[in-house]
Image: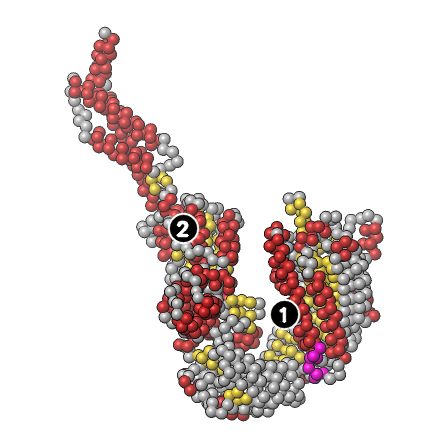
Amino acid sequence: MDLLGQAIISTADYNLNFEEKKQALKRKLERLESMEIDVIKELEGAESRSSKKRKNEVQNWLNNVGRLKNDIGTMELEAGPGLRRIQLGKLIEKKTENVEDLIDQRVKFQGGLLLDVQECRGDALFAPELVGQEFQENFDKIQEFLMMDDVSVIGIWGMGGVGKTTLVAHIHNVLLQRQENVYWVTVSQDLSIYKLQNSIAKTIGFDLSNEDDLKKRAAKLSKALSEKQEFVLILDDLWNYFPLKEVGILAREKGCKLILTTRMLDVCRQMECQETIKVKSLPEFEAWQLFQDKLGKPLSLDVMEIAKSIASECAGLPLGIITIAASMRGADDICEWRNALRKLQESKVREGEMENEVFQALKFSYNRLNNSSLQQCFLYCGLYPEDHPIARDNVIEYLIDEGVIRGESRQAKLDEGHTMLNRLVRVCLLEEDSYFVKMHDLVRDMAIQIMEIDPRVVVKAGKELAEMPDLRNWSKNLVRISLMCNRIPEISFGYSPAFPNLSTLLLCENFRLRFIEYSFFEQLHGLKVLDLSQTGIEELPGSISYLVNLSALLLRECLGLRCLPSLAQLSALKKLDLYDSRVEKLPEGIEWLSNLSYLDLGFTYLELTPGILPKLSHMQFLALPLITVKEEEVASLRKLETLKCIFYDVGEFNKYRTSTSAPNLSSYQIIVGQVRERVLRFITTDLKTYVKTVTFCECGVSDGEDAPHIPKDVQYLRFIRCDVQRIISCLKIVTELKRLKIDDCDGTECCDIQRFISRSIPLSTPQNTFSLLQALEIHFCRGIKKLFPPVVLANLQNLEAISVDFCENMEELIAMDEEQETHDSNGGNIAQLILPKLQHFDLRHLPQMKSIYGGKLVCNSLKVILVVECPKLKQMPLSLITLVNGQPIPLPSLQIVELYPEELWESIEFERPDAKNILRSIQRPVHWRGVWKLQLEVQRRLHEQLEIAYSSHDSRIPCSRGVLELQLEIQRRLHEQLERIRKMWDEKSKASSSSMDDPSPHSQMQN
């Protein structure tokens, strides 16, 4: 009865509430349709702006909504009273429940509608195996940089073919394996912002095709990248700078890392890379290993040595090694190997993979220079022999002489030359090596191939030629010929080359060349640069007068040359270099050379005819002979920029200082006093680092009006056997002094040098005499007892090196005043001096040295401390220990602490009881003690030789045999000591890997 009642009620409900149920379904369906529209719009917008895709559950929901709408749309919703209405009412109720379920599903979607698509990161790249220890180190460095929060842009640079792309490809693959977001974009050589945006967008799976405005594209791309949260973007082979923001890369945002590879350091700098890594060529051993690996099979013994020579021709360039090894794979005939080596050595590899893969990659860098002068500079470096260090100044002078570098002032030309070389270094066409540059062997081969086409050049430098080549087969259109560094003995009869366009002829460093036939120069009318330096030439033929366009005649270090023919016809001559030749008088007609702007007579004994120098009014560079010069001979040269000369005494020097009218003088090397050649050679080798130097040697100095007028911009002052007190009293106006060296000044008044320094220097001025001082050296000054007071030292905030040795009576380096001593003895705070930039502290053979300083010296940049043969020294005032996480360690900058003999470690007291044990970890190996003994002996004996040189009455006697023998003995014994140290170090390394905390002998030797 109950069931029947429920059925009756249900039937009545379906009949009475049918319309209400129908309207409820309609309302809820409308809500569902609104949700569907919103979801579709959100998905379409997000998917077009980023690489994210809709979740599967979202797509399933949309499909279900579509099916449900279709079902409801096909339903017949009208029915009269009765069974049909009851059936339809039940169906409406079911569809309403379905609609409600879909509404609930939409509300409950977890984590949004979209999902990052992992496949957008791309596939692993082909990456050859990393070869060599340095490649592995670079790989580790990059991974470390990626972990640093403060490093967002990393630059990898190096020459073409050196392995930059391979290195970064390995980084890409490692990140991919870790499931990290990493995107690789190869940058086209014709870079444009639009193309780069497209490349990046395509890589991350983002569509930019509907937007053309660059700024809007950048905004959209930036937003798409930011949604990645954390990612690494790699831009490979970048040639030009571009603003990151203009592309849409916000590299400084958290989680964004950018790695770029380029051949140019300038690009790294312009892109504001926080860290840069230069990828270098492989060392010889690793290069040979790679070559063998790529050959794929062992070589016979007769081929082995040839193969090694072929591998070495690639000079460590991985691309070259791999390419050449691949081309030789399967070659068994020794003739084929010899032929390949010969072609490589002759730079004749023009066909096949070597040309296409290597030279084209390198030549592209050359073509990208887009500057003919810069290209000429690069090609000039190819005139030097293979593996020959190229002196910067030397190649710049060539470019000036030939007119490639132009400018009004000589300094402007030099600056332009160094700028050009720096540019070539930064684009990896040259390698930097201190004052030299070097050219990679394959880069040189490419340069020679370019020169052999346009312009026409012959390069036979360093080929061990024992005779002059046959010139008859050479093109008449030759522009440059380089025969430097050969063994040509003469240019004999029959050589009269007709090369009307020849501008440069380099015969330098043919040490056996003694004779040139008269006819040789007769038809070389266009020659601009003739270099016969370091040859054995004894005289020049008179036919040199035919060289009417000659701009530079270079005869440096021609030790057999005694005289020159008349130069009166060489009206175009701008440069005459006779440095260290044996020419005894100036050639006739030199006074007619109105264009002469460079004259180097250094280390010659030429007789200067009075009145000639003032006629050379265009003179910019003047280096005068070993004989002293009168001030009136040089004072009138108004265009002078560089001067190297000797004045007889302080009087002549002062006359020059007061009468000179050379406003552009930017470089000078002036010596005052009567200096013999042997002493001068010791002196000048010490002056090369500085452009403004004055040396006083055995000078009588007065006070007042007769005091020397030292230039205020002097950088390096050296006093040898002078009255130091009076010289120092003249330093009040000197403001740019960087190095002060006092040698062998053992007069009685020197004992109070500290009093005179403190009295003479105006410490109250902001930029006083010693404020820029970087190095202070005192040698063989027997009378000095105390060097200077704290008030002077406290002012030396730029001091980097202190060196004091063989001052037999020195007792105290820094003398404390009475007030400080009383304060300390009464228990007050210990006086403290801070030298923030001091790196090298060197005290040697000071038998009376009792104290360095009575207070405390804080020098947190110290690298090297050497205390040798100071037996009375009892305390080390330097603060050498710091705390890291509560643990005492040596100063982070400290590399070497050396006390010799060993007893000093026991007798000297340090600031901490445990300092000795801590500092011994950076002590040199025991075998260095022999080196110290040798160095002390060397210094003593060299000083004795200087004594002999000073006392010699004949100033023209060449450097004595004793000095030469001493130098050879020094070289031999140092070599023996170093070999012993290396062997000892190798044994120590094998015995225990844990003992490698000490610096290696190699790095020690460099220090």
Q: How far across and down, in percent of the image, does residue 618 sit? A: 58, 82
Residue 161's quadrant in the figure?
A: bottom left
Viewer-nearest residue: 385 or 542: 385
The quadrant holding residue 535 is: bottom right
Q: Position of residue 434 (x, y in %)?
A: 57, 67
| Residue 961 magenta | yes
Q: Nearer the viewer, residue 851 or 297?
A: 297
Q: Quadrant of the N terminus?
A: top left
Q: Which amino acid lies under the numbered mark 2 shown in the image of this protein?
A: Tyr
Which residue is drawn at the image coordinates 57% and 89% (left, top)? 539
Q: Could you tell me which secondary element the residue under label 2 belongs to?
A: strand
Mark 2: few/some/many CA within 10 Å (<14, 14-19, 20+)? many
x%, y% of residue 803? 72, 64
- Mark 1 lies on a secondary structure that is loop
Residue under circle 2? 183
Q: Is residue 989 above or below residue 639?
A: above
- Give the left or right position of residue 876, taking residue 492 as reference: right
Mark found first going from the N terminus, 2 or 1: 2
Q: Which numbered dot is residue 689? A: 1
Instruction: Count every numbered label the image shows and give the total.
Output: 2
Q: Nearer the viewer, residue 311 or 823?
A: 311
Res 183 visible? yes
Tag 1: amino acid? Thr
Q: Bounds of the magenta span?
A: 955-962
Residue 5 numbered mark, or none: none
From this view, report whether residue 522 is shown above or below residue 34.
below
- Position of 542 with respect to 330 (left or right) is right
Residue 708 visible in the picture: no
Which residue is at 27% across, 27% downward? 98
